[in-house]
Amino acid sequence: MTKMQRTKGAAGERELFALLSEQLGVTVTRNLTQTRGGGADSLNVEGWAIEVKRQETLSISSWWSQTQRQADDLSRKPILFYRQSRKPWRAVLDLHHIAPGIFIAPGGLCELALSDACTVIRESLP
């Protein structure tokens, strides 16, 4: 990964975390240990492992695999946020985590707007 890619990724994380902090009412910060194998990009939202991608070429399947692995390691629910240039933030999560009584088996992914993902997260917080 080049320095420019790392800089773009870190800027994307800061941008998203500011939006999440505003919409969720909790401070969302970067997981600075992530580069040393610490897992998800943020662990500040109780119960969720947040992964952030700020890239032009989408690779949702591989990103989701990474997100899910990290969340499993941390015993948290995975959520992937991504954004391309000049487009809004999107979220990917498993329907099982939105409505576990209806979607019993994990594996059915859905894509949501940022505001809808924040609603799902807020509803899951204690």
Image (cartoon, rainbow, N blue to C red):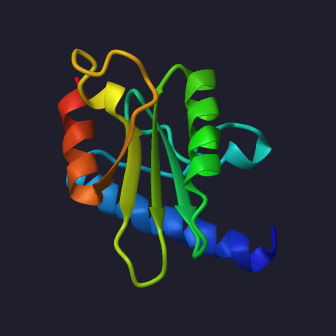
In the displayed structure, does residue 87 sit left or right of residue 124?
A: right
Q: Nearer the viewer, residue 76 or 38?
A: 76
Indicate the position of residue 93 as horizontal and vertical percent values.
Answer: 40, 40
Indicate the position of residue 97 as horizontal and vertical percent values.
Answer: 33, 27
Indicate the position of residue 87 as horizontal and vertical percent values.
Answer: 38, 78
* Residue beneath the point at 31% across and 62% down: 19
Q: Can residue 116 be spotted in the picture?
A: yes
In the displayed structure, does residue 23 sit left or right of residue 5?
A: left
Q: Can residue 24 be spotted in the picture?
A: no
* Residue beneath the point at 48% across and 75% down: 84
Indicate the position of residue 35 as horizontal and vertical percent values.
Answer: 74, 49
Q: Is residue 57 above or below residue 102?
A: below
In the displayed structure, does residue 103 sit left or right of residue 70?
A: left
Which quadrant is the C terminus positioned in?
top left
For residue 15, what is the image quadrant? bottom left
Which quadrant is the N terminus positioned in?
bottom right
Count how many numbered circles sit on residues in the image: 0
* Residue beneath the point at 37% across and 66% down: 89
For residue 40, what is the image quadrant? top right
Q: Nearer the viewer, residue 16 or 88?
A: 88
* Residue beneath the point at 63% across and 31% down: 69
Q: Nearer the viewer, residue 109 or 73?
A: 109
Q: Is residue 69 above or below residue 36?
A: above
